[in-house]
Image (cartoon, rainbow, N blue to C red):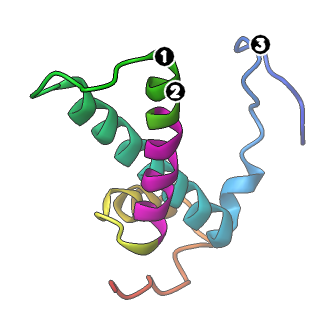
Amino acid sequence: MSGVIGATGGISVDTSRLKSSENLKKAGEKFEAVFDGLMLKSMRQAKLANPLFDSKAIDTFTEMQDAQVAQSMAEHAPMGIGKAMTEFLAKSQSDLNSVPPEPIK
C-alpha cells in the first residue's frame, strides 16, 4: 500500500516510513522547529514597542529569519518537545523499541 492516497482527503495512509528510527528522529526535529517557529511568531506578535521601520518587506524578512532561527534552535539547542514526540511514537513501533533511546545532550 506504499504511496497510496487514501480516502482521507489526500492524506497518505502509508505508515511504513514510521518504522525507521532515523525517520522518527527527523520528524521530531522538524516538529521541534515548527514549535519553535510558532513560539517566535507569537513573541513577535506581542509588539511591546512601535517599530521604527514598519513595512511588508521587513515583515517578510522577519518571518524568513524566524524560520531559520527556529530550525537552528531545533538542531543545536532543542527544548525537548521533538524528542518527547519521537519517544511517544516509537513506543507504538515494536521493532523500534529494541533500539536504546539517545542520551539527552
On the image, the x and y values in percent for residue 13 come to: 74, 32
For the residues bearing labels 3 and 1, Cβ distance under 8 angstroms: no
Residues rendered magenta in the picture: 63-75
Q: Residue at x 74, y 54 (%)?
A: 17
Q: Assign a secondary structure to mark 3.
A: loop
Q: Please, which residue is most extreme toward the left here?
A: 48
In which quarter of the view is residue 73 placed? bottom left
Residue 42 inside the magenta-drawn segment: no
Q: Residue at x 72, y 24 (%)?
A: 11
Q: Which residue is mark 3?
A: 7
Q: Assign a secondary structure to mark 2.
A: helix
In which quarter of the view is residue 78 placed? bottom left
Find residue 56 and name its label: 1
Name the quarter where the N terminus is drawn: top right
For the residues bearing labels 1 and 2, Cβ distance under 8 angstroms: yes
Find residue 60 and name its label: 2
Q: Residue at x 67, y 63 (%)?
A: 23
Q: Nearer the viewer, residue 16 or 74?
A: 74
Amino acid identity at mark 1: Lys
Q: Please determine whether, in this image, residue 67 is positioned above or below residue 105.
A: above
Foreground mark, 3 or 1, reads 1
Q: Residue at x 40, y 42 (%)?
A: 37
Amino acid identity at mark 3: Ala
